[in-house]
Amino acid sequence: MKHTILGAGGSIGNALTYELLRNGQEVRLVSRSKYSINGTDSFKADITSFDETLKSLNGSDIVYLCAGLPYDNKIWAMGLAEDYAKCDRRLHKG
């Protein structure tokens, strides 16, 4: 199974990465800076971009959202909630 971590450069994403690797899992790291750790696949993406996020999730079986998006009504008013709902539906199609 491929595990994808959005916000991999943060402390939670980092700790999760090492735990998954210790358990022999395939891990893809997604971050703004293409953060990498040996034994993982790295992907640079801005998760506020629906298209970039969708590309980064291609082939993923499990996705962890560890990014610290600020709580800001302007961000959510941009339609991100609806975009991520669409993304979720596309991933589960098949």
Image: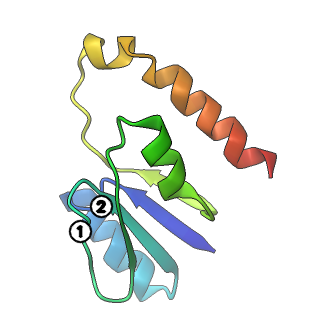
Give the numbered dot on residue 63: none
Q: Residues within 10 Å of mark 1 (few under 14, many from 20)?
A: some
Of badges 1 and 2, nearer the viewer stands 1
* N-terminal label among 1 and 2: 2
Amino acid type shown at disc 1: Tyr
> Whole-Å distance between the Cαs marked 1 and 2?
7 Å
Front-most of residues 16 and 61 = 61
Element class at badge 1: loop
Q: In this view, does 75 lie above or below 88?
A: above
Task: Residue type at mark 2: give it.
Answer: Ala
Question: Which residue shows up at 28% across the image and 11% down it?
Answer: 73
Closer-to-camera residue (56/12): 56
> How far across and down, in percent of the image, does residue 90 sit?
70, 41
76 lies above or below 50? above
Q: Which of 52 and 70 is in front in this view?
A: 52
Q: Are marks 1 and 2 in contact (CB under 8 Å)?
A: yes
- Residue 84: percent from left, percent from top: 53, 32
Mark 2 element type: loop
x then y, percent, for residue 4: 48, 63
Kindly indicate the quadrant of the structure image that contains residue 86.
top right
x 45%, y 54%: residue: 64
Residue positioned 37% across, 11% down in the render: 77
| Residue 35, label in figure | 1
Say above or below: 70 vs 16.
Answer: above
Locate residue 26 relative to residue 8 in the image: left or right.
Answer: right
Which residue is disc 2 drawn over? 8
Q: Residue furthest front?
A: 51
The x, y position of residue 68, in whole percent, is: 24, 41
